[in-house]
Amino acid sequence: MFTDPIADYLTRIRNANAARLKMVEIPSSNTKRAITAILFDQGYIANYKFEQGIIKIALKYNQSTKVPAITKIERASRPGLRKYASAADMPRVLNGLGIAIVSTSKGVITDKEARKENVGGEVLCYVY
């Protein structure tokens, strides 16, 4: 059993990007499914599929330069030190070019949506 399943999820994506893999398989949970949907909506991954407790993610690369769409993906809040932010104090990643994924009372959403809906919550990770 993992102490931090979200950190494991992010590390698997980071390692697959470094190895230039096309697909990565990750054990599923509701939070991971929500994060995957956000990454797809924001254009960081090419495609995804949910199958019997597994998330299959197709990673996205630039066709000409082969550079990954995800330059950096890092955990913000961790089990030993949770990071919470109000709607007013929501972090801006690379001055708005990246996204922060936040777990709120309205579900897992991006920092921009959290500001728009005026809700705060736990900052899960930063992606750019």
Image (spheres, rainbow, N blue to C red):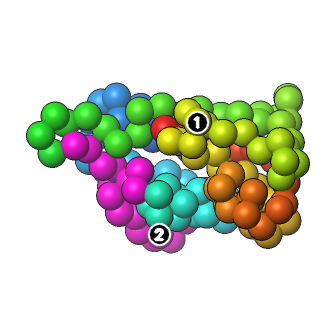
Left or right for 65, reference 18: left
Magenta span of residues: 43-62
Residue, x 34% and y 28% (percent of image)? 18
Residue, x 59% and y 57% (percent of image)? 35
Q: Residues within 10 Å of mark 2 (few under 14, many from 20)?
A: some
Left or right for 98, reference 1: left
Where is residue 45? Give x, y as percent. Answer: 38, 54
Mark seen at residue 50: 2
Give whichever of discs 2 and 1 has the lower sequence position: 2
Mark seen at residue 17: none
Residue, x 57% and y 43% (percent of image)? 96
Q: Is residue 52 shown in magenta?
A: yes
- Report how far apart the C-alphas of labels 2 and 1 lie in the structure: 33 Å
Secondary structure character of the magenta stretch overall: strand
Asked if labels 1 and 2 touch by Cβ distance under 8 angstroms, the answer is no
- Give the labeled residue for mark 1: 95
Q: Nearer the viewer, residue 86 or 60?
A: 86
Position of 19 relative to 33 (above/below) = above
Quadrant of the rendered image containing residue 53: bottom right
Badge 1 element: helix
Quadrant of the rendered image containing residue 71: top left
Left or right for 95, reference 14: right
Q: Residues within 10 Å of mark 1 (few under 14, many from 20)?
A: few
Quadrant of the rendered image containing residue 95: top right
Q: Nearer the viewer, residue 74 or 114?
A: 114
Q: Is residue 1 shown in magenta?
A: no
Left or right for 29, reference 55: right
Q: Farthest residue in the left direction?
A: 64
User: Which three-letter amino acid code belongs to the residue tagged 1?
Assistant: Asn
Q: Is residue 29 visible?
A: no
